[in-house]
Image (cartoon, rainbow, N blue to C red):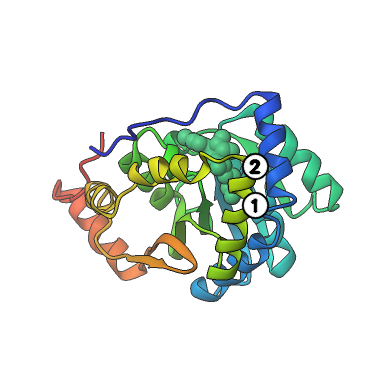
């Protein structure tokens, strides 16, 4: 079972506001770039999307702005959910972006309810990566795609942000390295296998570090059959 070594401290009102301040200034240009990359890779433009560990909701807002998706944001921090609600209202996107409070370990949505599941900068802090991947997979519709990881969209944005973040917090890059160690390729591959996900792309390039997996309709039929006969590859608790 893959578990995180250093859990991120819970967000207080103050630290959640600090993160929102960074997200709406220094990080701001990355969200439309990443949203565009996700929409292109998933080849999707409408339906429902879940943004897991959405924080203040900027990726969800970019996804709703660039597509016809209805985006549900999910975060286990109440201060982050409150900020997400305020940001969504600022963009008058209340009908298209719906903030929800909850944990990836037990996503409060039904099986096969989402066409797209996205998550940026959050899986480094999930207590149980295996359970998190399994939950993301559970809520995906057959034919849907999950795009989970972290990054800044491209090399120019990543390098510009590193300069600004170093000025703000000289320890930022060291902290980042620690968070990434929670999700090394080895841990991610083990967690995916343990959650019954065997086909995926592990992207490590200038766009960031992302795991993409789809739920194929054909494979679902086989899984259902195996579930009925007790032969299933899923070993998460
Ligand atoms: N995705 C946002 C972004 O890119 O701007 C926020 C990233 S922030 C670094 C990580 C977020 O993941 C935080 O808002 C945190 O509360 C959330 N998070 C961490 N563990 C979580 C969990 N188990 N379930 C739901 N959200 C979680």
Residue 118: percent from left, percent from top? 52, 55
Q: Is residue 205 above or below residue 233?
A: below
Residue 195: percent from left, percent from top? 27, 47
Task: Using the image as rendered, state which of residue 8 and residue 237 is in the foreground.
Answer: 8
Under circle 1, the secondary element is helix
Residue 58: percent from left, percent from top? 69, 52
Task: Using the image as rendered, state which of residue 114 and residue 33 is in the foreground.
Answer: 33
Q: CA distance from mark 2 to mark 1?
A: 6 Å
Give the image quarter of residue 85: top right
Q: Is residue 145 above or below residue 108?
A: below
Residue 16: percent from left, percent from top? 67, 32
Left or right: where 67 falls relative to 166: right
Local packing at callout 2 (Cα closer than 10 Å; few below 14, some 14-19, many 20+) is few
Give the image quarter of residue 31: bottom right
Q: Is residue 103 visible in this depiction of the protein? A: yes
Q: Which residue is mark 2?
A: 168
Where's ligand 1: which quadrant? top right
Under circle 2, the secondary element is helix
Tally of marks: 2
Picture quarter with the N terminus: top left
Local packing at callout 1 (Cα closer than 10 Å; few below 14, some 14-19, many 20+) is few
Left or right: where 212 falls relative to 29: left
> Residue at image x 33%, y 44%?
181
Q: Is residue 75 visible in this depiction of the protein? A: no
Q: Which residue is mark 1?
A: 164
> Residue at image x 20%, y 42%?
235
Mark 2 and ligand 1: say if the CB distance to the nearest ligand atom is below 8 Å.
Answer: no
> Is the Cβ of the residue at disc 2 closer than 8 Å to that at disc 1?
yes
Left or right: where 163 falls relative to 196: right
> Residue at image x 68%, y 42%?
56
């Amino acid at each position: 079972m893959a578990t995180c070594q250093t859990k991120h401290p819970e967000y207080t009102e103050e630290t959640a506001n600090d993160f929102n301040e960074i997200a709406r200034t220094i990080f701001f240009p990355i969200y439309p770039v990443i949203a565009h990359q996700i929409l292109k890779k998933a080849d999707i433009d409408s339906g429902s999307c879940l943004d897991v560990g959405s924080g203040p909701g900027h990726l969800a807002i970019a996804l709703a702005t660039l597509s016809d998706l209805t985006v549900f944001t999910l975060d286990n921090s109440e201060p982050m959910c409150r900020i997400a609600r305020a940001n969504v209202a600022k963009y008058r996107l209340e009908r298209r972006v719906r903030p929800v409070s909850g944990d990836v370990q037990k996503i409060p949505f039904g099986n096969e309810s989402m066409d797209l599941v996205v998550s940026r900068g959050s899986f480094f802090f999930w207590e149980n990566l295996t359970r998190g991947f399994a939950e993301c997979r559970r809520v995906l519709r057959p034919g849907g795609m999950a795009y989970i990881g972290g990054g800044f969209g491209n090399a120019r944005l990543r390098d510009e942000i590193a300069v600004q973040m170093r000025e703000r917090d000289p320890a930022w890059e060291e902290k980042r390295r620690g968070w990434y160690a929670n999700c090394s390729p080895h841990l991610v591959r083990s967690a995916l296998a343990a959650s019954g996900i065997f086909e995926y792309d592990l992207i490590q390039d200038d766009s960031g570090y992302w795991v993409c997996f789809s739920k194929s309709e054909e494979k679902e039929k086989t899984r259902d059959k195996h579930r009925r006969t007790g032969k299933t590859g899923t070993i998460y608790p």
